[in-house]
Image (cartoon, grey):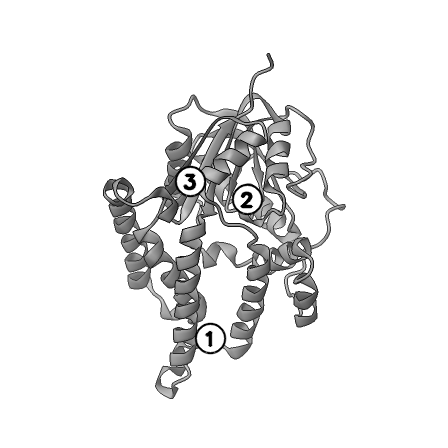
Amino acid sequence: MTASPNDGIDPAPRPHATAEEVEAARKDTKLAQVLYHDWEAETYDDKWSISYDERCIDYAKGRFDAVAGDLPLPYERALELGCGTGFFLLNLMQGGVAKTGSVTDLSPGMVKVALRNAEHLGLKVDGRVADAERIPYDDNTFDLVVGHAVLHHIPDVEQSLREVLRVLKPGGRFVFAGEPSTVGNFYARWLGRATWEATTTVTKLPFLASWRRPQEELDESSRAAALEAVVDIHTFDPTDLENMAKSAGGTEVRAITEEFAAALLGWPVRTFEAAVPPEKLGWGWAKFAFGGFKTLSWVDEKLLKHIVPRNFFYNVMITGVKPEPK
């Protein structure tokens, strides 16, 4: 079962941002984070094909192992920073990486969904609505801190990493994955915008009308996209991120990258899925999308990582350790 220490205290989710709220959020990045992620919370797992079965357990554990290496497992207590729907921590727990967990996010909607997912899976997890720059836990609380696609949302990344190291026990490890590289983000965004424009334009043709989502859904997606431009604050050069983690106090710091060819397919696929009615995309599409991603990930791992500079790959992953006291 799950329990939240802040039941009755955390703010309620706000799943529908108005145009006026979006405009206000352009000048307030943390408001934008809440509005955007509350809007996404209930549909986020479907949008990104997130599940809590063998497929995503293997993916999450694979990312952890790729950057952290072969470590003694499980960790006793883990924290996920910027948990979203709990994808990373819950799948890592199912994969034997941690026994118990805590989730935090600035978005009440995301914390709500993450705790619901944990309860359905029978995992021992608590949650708090929290700012990653001021983690609401005592010093030396956790054996492991993880996050997936969170650092690029945080205004002061180095301050957040200092907080991560504060709440870790000496010798504890942090692992962050799914962060956009600067080069990778450039081509991924371009591909996404081009796919969205092409799909929403072509489906205006009468004989393709059944492939067009209702205009109100497209308009809401456009408002979300406007917020996304505000909430995605950073991109990272892997070396710069390593230096930031070291400056925050981490030791044994190491960054690696992945997804080059896979990203060139993945971003158009995800954008297309968001632009057309879901009932139009059956098992054949899912098999193509997942199979193509796996195949191109294999090409990235076996071939391209040996000849393409690491900063050209889309995903950055980083790990480090809190030093033991001298």
Find the residue positioned furthest to the top.
Answer: 326
Q: Is residue 227 visible?
A: yes
Name the residue tied to disc 3: 60
Q: Amino acid at mark 3?
A: Ala
Task: Tell which circle, 2 or 1, labels the residue nearer the N-terminal end.
Answer: 2
> Who's the residue at 67% across and 60% down the image?
14
Q: Left or right: 313 with respect to 241?
A: left
Q: Amino acid at mark 1?
A: Arg
- Crowding around mark 1 (Cα neighbors within 10 Å: few <14, some 14 to 19, many 20+) is some
Identify whether 95 is placed above or below 225: above
Q: Residue 213, labelled with which disc?
A: 1
- Crowding around mark 2 (Cα neighbors within 10 Å: few <14, some 14 to 19, many 20+) is many
Q: Amino acid at mark 2?
A: Leu
| SS for dot 3 | helix
Q: Are marks 2 and 1 in contact (CB under 8 Å)?
A: no
Q: CA distance from mark 1 to mark 3?
A: 31 Å
> Who's the residue at 44% across and 45% down the image?
52
Q: Are marks 3 and 2 in contact (CB under 8 Å)?
A: no
Identify whether 202 is placed above or below 127: below
Task: Tell which circle, 1 or 3, labels the residue nearer the N-terminal end.
Answer: 3
